[in-house]
Image (cartoon, rainbow, N blue to C red):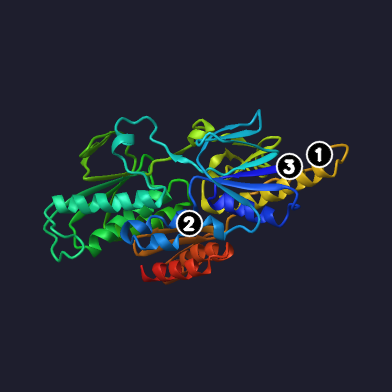
Amino acid sequence: MRVLILGAGYAGVTVARRLESMLPPEVELVVVDESESHLVKHEVHRVIRRPSVSEAIRVPLSDLFDRASIRTARVAAVDREARAVHLENGETLSYDYAAVCLGSETADYGIPGVAEHGLPLTSVDDALEINEAFREAAARAGESDVAESDTDSGGVDVVVGGAGLSGIQTAGELAAFAREEAVDADVMLIEQERRVAPNFPANFQTAVRSALESAGVSIETGTTVERATESAVETDRGTFPADVFVWAGGIAGTDAMGGDRPIVQSDLRIDERTFAVGDAGRGVDADGEPIPASASAALREARTVADNIARLVDHERSNSDGFTPRLDPYRFEVPGWIVSVGDQTVAQLGPEVVTGAAAKAMKTAVGAGHLSSVGAIRNAAELAEAELRA
């Protein structure tokens, strides 16, 4: 019997590590990911300003698992009917049960020019590309050496499309980067909805907007991006110059899932033997509430999926007659939300919004806590130091 875990992000690592202790040794457990490292993705924005952080937020997969085997390959397609996974290297892996934890891709919604000119932020390489684009733009604007310049004679126009958590953190980081490097930059955040962080509580939205404004970020809400060019972003409210354009406007399914994020049942299955975890799927929880695409949700979904897979495997191996076991539904319960805005942090714990040192400590604890939970103690210490220094 073989159980496949597709993807080694938050969800995949959590499912695999939990199953290592729950499945009998006779059951083959395989983790498939195109990277050899696990990425603490909610901290990747820090790499824009501090590339050295990339070492702290990546952990070799070989350090994370005790018995799971690792296949380093990109998933090309998932054939659920045949219970087979096709890899880009030509290999095909069959499965008895699978957890699809492939995350999502940045959605461009077919907006002309966005795919060609909008820089995404989903990986360390993306963050480094944004860093380079900003430095090149500053150089073109008259800065001979951004890293050591003590003047602000140039001007760089930065546009970030999408004011979800990723867009907020990106805009805040770029504004802080410009300030540190004494670059005269106009960082603008564009959002189609009427408020920033539109999927979050009103008091959290208000605190985030205040943090963005104090960081020097210009905000254009209720504004729809209609086209992007090499030097500008065109919207329904006018055209904005853009030496650097970062697109964080939404998510879509991966190519391996045909661009789809399939609807999941309350137990997170998309069929009898295949689960979708985290951003890879979409659906409602046991209370009928939509499950947001977030690291917090993915980590908690992963625990439910691991328990359900273990229950199904045990039932099948025991040759039990009768009905299949009842699986646990997933109930979305997250204590709060945290977002970085440059050197500031906004956190919501229950109904209360927290800022300042307390919020920064919470943010530090989340990232370092995740790394500690997977045994990456050195990385946790390095990330905590980087966060507290920000």
Q: Please name the residue shown 32% across and 53% down the image.
A: 128
Horizontally, residue 230 falls left or right of residue 282, namely left
Image coordinates for residue 362, horizontal then vertical, percent = 49, 66
Task: Using the rendered image of the protein, determine whether residue 332 is visible from the camera's viewpoint.
Answer: no
Q: Which mark is residue 199?
A: none
Q: Secondary structure at mark 1?
A: loop
Question: Few, some or many C-alpha atoms within 10 Å of disc 3 (few <14, some 14-19, many ≥20)?
Answer: few
What type is the residue that disc 2 sits on? Val
- Name the image quarter holding the C terminus: bottom left
Q: Residue at x 70, y 38 (%)?
A: 96
Residue at figure coordinates x 53%, y 69% from the top left: 377
Residue linked to disc 1 = 324
Name the front one of labels 1 and 3.
3
Quarter of image, res 5: top right
Quick one: 251 or 144, which is closer to the camera? 144
Other-residue count near label 1 (Cα within 10 Å), few / some / many at <14 / 14–19 / ≥20: few
**Considering depth in this image, is 144 or 284 the residue closer to the camera?**
144
Name which residue lies at 43% across and 58% down.
43
**Real-space Cα separation, disc 2 to disc 1, in angstroms:** 36 Å
Q: Which residue is mark 2?
A: 40
Q: Secondary structure at mark 3?
A: loop
Specify the amino acid type for callout 1.
Answer: Thr
Q: Which residue is mark 3?
A: 1
Q: Report whether 183 appears left or right of 195.
A: left
Q: Is residue 33 visible?
A: yes
Upstream in sequence: badge 2 or badge 3: 3
Q: Viewer-proximal residue, 196 or 156?
A: 156
First in residue order: circle 2 vs circle 1: 2
- Determine the secondary structure under disc 2: loop
Identify the amino acid type marked 3: Met
